[in-house]
């Protein structure tokens, strides 16, 4: 290492100010803490904006309400996708990356100044794209399929945002290097950090794909490039768009492990298995964009099958493994704490009144049952014919990205506020309800949109009643479709209430929550079956014997549902018109 | 705990519990089954998208569709001015997508195969045949040729389900399926 580098290293180390977390004993770099706060706050702000848009969209798609005009509907839908899927999720992921590196490893963060540069780029980019959409000339949906054309600053904003996120990824990696060199931990990095590392590696790949497609599209929008091939655009765009969902999965699985560790003291059953499952995400990401191209002309079936199945479902295997090891580790920890009666005492006596735990467990269950199964069905080459671009698709991904990722991130917030913002959660009674309200609403929008999708109701569609004044060849969906859309609207209201509550509680706690100090630190993390956080720092529990009947039952139930639903769909497919 | 380094330094040598191994094997096998199911359906199933696709100049496609409509037109669809076109069974049928309609209306015979040519002259569109819920992506410049065999008589709607601009929800079309020898 050169002298200059050594010197700046030295200065970096001197300049770093730490505090010690009273709940966990971890050393917290104050520079990292500030970055985590900024990114988390930005995330919540965009969730508020984007969530409101989501409600407006759902109310418009409810035929009896039909709130917005068509132009506004497409505008608001574009903004909804961008603000929640990109801005809310990725800002929050930046906070997770900084937390999982600097805080969990008790390390100083690498290049915090660059962290602020990245943050500023993300904020400016996010605002720029929002402005483009709200100006009204860029209602192209967040996918912006060419040759639909948005204003140049729509694409430019996305590019700036991505560059900012890329900087965050490198800071994460740099912090891992620093922690290793300065020996802030012993042995291998913790599982949560490993999961975050998985997310980070996939993010780098994702952002590279994004650059490859968005930069030419930007140049095309200002007139430097004459033509962009529609199929190539989709292929590369989804290499970003779908892979980034794998970032979300890695991040929220890491959060599951984190919350299970903090709230019930769960310890991975097998480090080897859990880590291998994360690695499967990286190795078999494949051309995940294939999912989105199953009914496209111009691609071979062989290509579709290999890529859509992530090379024989090996990435799905990763999720199925986590789906067992996360509840398994919770069951093992609970049994160790003495909840050994029957098959499910461990689950009944779990801290359901702790919003972090409740949100995490709901996220786990709904991600698996609603999001995971429907995702595999959608991603099956021929079955996709029955669902492509119907509401089944948003139904599926609200189950993954809302009941899965968003709910997990909300749950994590109930730990981040006391641990990082050092404030207690205000309104603990309402906070206790929040994950259930939001979870139920989000499950509702997922299920009812999927239901409408099986009836063929189109996604991104302003008026499914096709009034004669509007169309010359009207079509009538079966009446039950309107019922589905009504139930979707009601669920949306429920989800919006849960979301608003989350925002009020988070913002309220940050501003007005009681200060957290050594006397109340552990209590601030919410009710727990046993106060284990403090002991766990000095002494690790043993996962104990491998007798986890409750988990076997849950996994068996999941697997049975999966198989039945899978073959039912093949049955439906066989009833379609023969085609080849 | 997952927030601390693994307890045993050499964690990768720890044995994996039997229950975990069982689940991993089952899940892995299930993945294989699902993988081969898609291949199986290509061989034995009736519903597979064709890979018969060609690049085509949108103007050429439009011209072919016009010629097709002129040749096989049987009537107008009410007073809409849209022709209803009845291709010979076993023959080629064309449907063109453009902002914001599917053109022309087709009349097909039940139980007869048709080579359906679909393409777009402007943006991407989504061919959604209802209520049977069969959905195909349509690109400008790519001609998708699918052999379909209607199985039941009736009136079918075609709805665009790929967002294609502010009039996207106005983009509909229609296909009639009649008993052989009837209609016209
Ligand atoms: C109050 C909560 C929410 C409600 C009521 C809601 C509702 C909806 C509805 C009704 C649609 C329109 C489906 C269509 O017409 O095609 C939609 C689209 C979408 N939502 Fe949400 N949503 C919510 C939260 C979220 C969150 C938290 C995320 C992401 C993390 C999300 C991601 C998306 C995306 C990516 C789309 C697709 C936009 C497009 O098709 O371009 N939503 N949402
Ligand atoms: Cu269209
Ligand atoms: Cu359309």
Image (cartoon, helix red, strand yellow):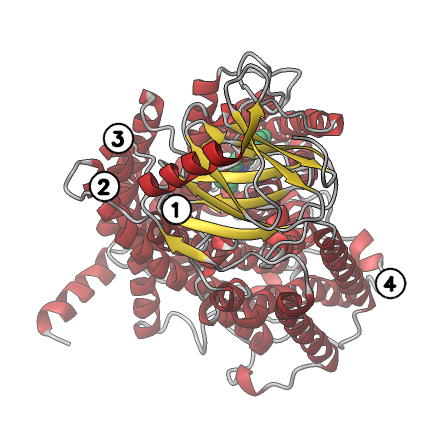
Q: Chain of mark 3?
A: A
Q: Is residue B98 left or right of residue B45?
A: left
Residue A517 at least partly seen: no
Disc marking residue A545: none
Q: Chain of mark 2?
A: A
- Check contact, mark 4 vs mark 3: CB within 8 A: no
First-in-chain label (1 vs 2)? 1
Quarter of the picture holding the C terminus of chain B? top right
Residue lying at 74% horizontally and 38% vertically, measured from the top left: B179
Q: Nearer the viewer, residue A521 or B96?
A: B96
Mark 1 Cα within 10 Å, few/some/many (few <14, many 20+)? many
First-in-chain label (4 vs 3)? 3
**Share a chain, discs 1 and 3?**
yes
- Secondary element at tag 4: loop
- Secondary element at tag 3: loop
Say which of marks 4 and 2 sits in front: 2
Residue lying at 80% horizontally and 74% vertically, measured from the top left: A547
């Amino acid at each position: 290492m050169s002298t200059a580098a050594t010197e700046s290293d030295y200065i970096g180390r001197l300049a770093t100010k730490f505090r010690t977390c009273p709940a966990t004993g971890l050393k917290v770099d104050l520079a990292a803490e500030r970055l985590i706060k900024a990114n988390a706050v930005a995330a919540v702000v965009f969730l508020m904006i984007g969530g409101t848009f989501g409600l407006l969209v759902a109310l418009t798609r409810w035929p009896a309400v039909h709130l917005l005009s068509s132009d506004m509907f497409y505008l608001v839908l574009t903004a909804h996708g961008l603000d929640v899927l990109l801005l809310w999720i990725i800002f929050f992921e930046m906070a997770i990356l900084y937390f999982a590196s600097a805080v969990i490893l008790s390390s100083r963060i690498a290049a915090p100044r660059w962290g602020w540069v990245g943050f500023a780029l993300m904020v400016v980019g996010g605002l720029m794209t929002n402005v483009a959409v709200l100006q009204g000339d860029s209602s192209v949906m967040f996918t912006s399929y060419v040759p639909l054309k948005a204003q140049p600053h729509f694409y430019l904003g996305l590019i700036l945002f991505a560059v900012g996120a890329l900087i965050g990824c490198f800071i994460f990696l740099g912090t891992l290097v620093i922690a290793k060199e300065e020996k802030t931990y012993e042995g291998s990095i913790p599982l949560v950090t490993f999961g975050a590392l998985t997310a980070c590696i996939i993010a780098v790949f994702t952002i590279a794909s994004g650059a490859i497609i968005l930069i030419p599209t930007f140049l095309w929008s200002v007139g430097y490039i004459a033509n962009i091939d529609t199929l190539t655009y989709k292929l590369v765009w989804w290499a970003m768009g779908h892979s980034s969902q794998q970032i979300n999965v890695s991040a929220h699985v890491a959060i599951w492990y984190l919350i299970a560790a903090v709230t019930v003291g769960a310890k991975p059953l097998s480090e080897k298995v859990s880590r291998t499952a994360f690695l499967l995400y990286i190795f078999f990401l494949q051309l995940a964009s294939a999912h989105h191209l199953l009914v496209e002309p111009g691609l071979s079936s062989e290509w579709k099958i290999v890529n859509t199945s992530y090379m024989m479902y090996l990435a799905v295997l990763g999720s199925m493994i986590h789906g067992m090891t996360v509840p398994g580790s919770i069951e093992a920890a609970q049994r160790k704490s003495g909840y050994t009666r029957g098959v499910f005492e461990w689950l009944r006596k779990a801290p359901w009144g702790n919003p972090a735990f409740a949100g995490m467990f709901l996220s786990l269950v709904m991600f698996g049952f609603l999001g995971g199964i429907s995702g595999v069905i959608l991603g099956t080459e021929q079955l996709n014919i029955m669902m492509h671009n119907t509401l089944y698709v948003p139904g599926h991904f609200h189950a993954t990205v809302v009941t899965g990722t968003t709910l997990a991130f909300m749950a994590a917030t109930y730990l981040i506020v006391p641990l990082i913002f050092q404030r207690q959660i205000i309104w603990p009674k309402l906070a206790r309800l929040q994950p259930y309200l939001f979870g139920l609403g989000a499950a509702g929008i997922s299920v009812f949109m999927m239901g409408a999708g099986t009836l063929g109701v189109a996604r991104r569609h302003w008026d499914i009643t096709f009034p004669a004044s509007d169309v010359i060849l009207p079509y009538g969906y079966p009446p039950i479709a309107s019922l589905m859309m009504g139930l979707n609207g009601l669920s949306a209201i429920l989800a919006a209430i849960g979301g608003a509550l989350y925002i009020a509680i988070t913002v309220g706690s940050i501003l007005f929550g009681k200060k957290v100090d050594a006397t109340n630190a552990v209590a601030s993390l919410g009710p727990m079956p046993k106060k284990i956080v403090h002991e766990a720092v000095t002494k690790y529990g043993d996962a104990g014997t491998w007798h986890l009947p409750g988990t076997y039952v849950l996994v068996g139930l999941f697997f049975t549902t999966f198989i039945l639903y899978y073959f039912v769909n093949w049955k439906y497919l066989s009833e379609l018109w023969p085609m080849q | 705990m997952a927030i601390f380094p693994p307890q045993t330094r050499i964690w990768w040598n720890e044995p994996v519990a039997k229950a975990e191994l069982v689940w991993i094997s089952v899940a892995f096998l299930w993945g294989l089954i699902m993988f081969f199911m898609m291949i199986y359906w290509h061989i034995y199933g009736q519903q597979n998208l064709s890979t018969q696709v060609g690049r085509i100049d949108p103007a050429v496609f439009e011209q072919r569709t016009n010629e097709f409509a002129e040749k096989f037109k049987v009537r107008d669809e009410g007073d809409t001015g849209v022709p209803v076109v009845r291709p010979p069974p076993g023959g080629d049928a064309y449907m063109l997508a453009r902002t914001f309609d599917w053109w022309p209306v087709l009349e097909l015979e039940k139980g007869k195969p048709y080579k359906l040519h679909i393409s777009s002259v402007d943006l991407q569109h989504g061919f959604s045949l209802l209520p049977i819920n069969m959905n195909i992506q349509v690109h400008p410049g790519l001609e998708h040729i699918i052999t379909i065999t209607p199985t039941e008589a009736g009136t079918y709607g075609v709805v665009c389900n790929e967002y294609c601009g502010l009039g996207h929800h106005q983009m509909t079309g229609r296909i009639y399926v009649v008993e052989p020898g009837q209609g016209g």
